Image (spheres, rainbow, N blue to C red):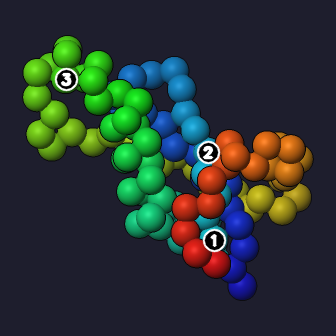
Amino acid sequence: MRELYVVYFESANYAGYGEHALVWASSVEEALADEQLAQHAEEFYYEQDGDQYLEEHGDDDGVVWAYIGSALPLKGSEFEQYVAKQPQLYPVVNQE
């Protein structure tokens, strides 16, 4: 049965901050391997870090922008209350 998982991802180039997204999946492994999550994370950190990276390195060919860290089921987790209060901070990146 598919359920929502909270997935943590972070910048591959700059330390100090990470983000969360929600993914429909049947297991932690499936959530971590979701291609739409990977695309979302890459695009998010390209937007966040791209200009600074280009300024510092001059080229961004082949750069990995994000690492997918961990996942846990939303239901019953401490994130359930956060998602209920501020759903805009936890985008659902794939379809049920």
Q: Is residue 23 left or right of residue 75?
A: left
Q: SS at mark 1?
A: strand
The quarter holding residue 64 reads top left
- In the image, residue 13 sits, relative to residue 24, either above or below, namely above
- In the image, residue 1 sits, relative to residue 83, either above or below, namely below
Image spot of residue 81 (x, y percent): 88, 47
Residue where numbered disc 2 is placed: 20
Count residues near mark 1 (Cα–Cα under 10 Å), then give few for <14, some for 14-19, many for 20+: many
As measured in the structure, the alpha-carbon distance from the residue carrying label 2 to the one carrying label 3 is 25 Å
First reached walking from the N terminus: tag 2 or tag 3: 2
Q: Are marks 2 and 3 in contact (CB under 8 Å)?
A: no
Image spot of residue 75 (x, y percent): 84, 62
Q: Residue at x 39, y 42 (%)?
A: 66
Which mark is nearer the camera, 2 or 3? 3
Q: Nearer the viewer, residue 63 or 58?
A: 58
Q: Residue at x 55, y 33 (%)?
A: 18
Q: Nearer the viewer, residue 8 or 45?
A: 45
Residue lying farthest to the top in this orientation: 56
- In the image, residue 84 sits, relative to residue 61, either above or below, namely below
Residue type indicated by callout 3: Leu
Residue type indicated by callout 1: Trp
Q: Are marks 3 and 1 in contact (CB under 8 Å)?
A: no
Residue 54 marker: 3
Image spot of residue 30 (x, y percent): 54, 71
Residue type indicated by callout 2: His
Residue where numbered disc 1 is placed: 24
Q: Is residue 67 visible?
A: no
Image spot of residue 1 (x, y percent): 72, 85
Q: SS at mark 3?
A: helix
Q: SS at mark 2?
A: strand
Q: Is residue 87 left or right of residue 63?
A: right
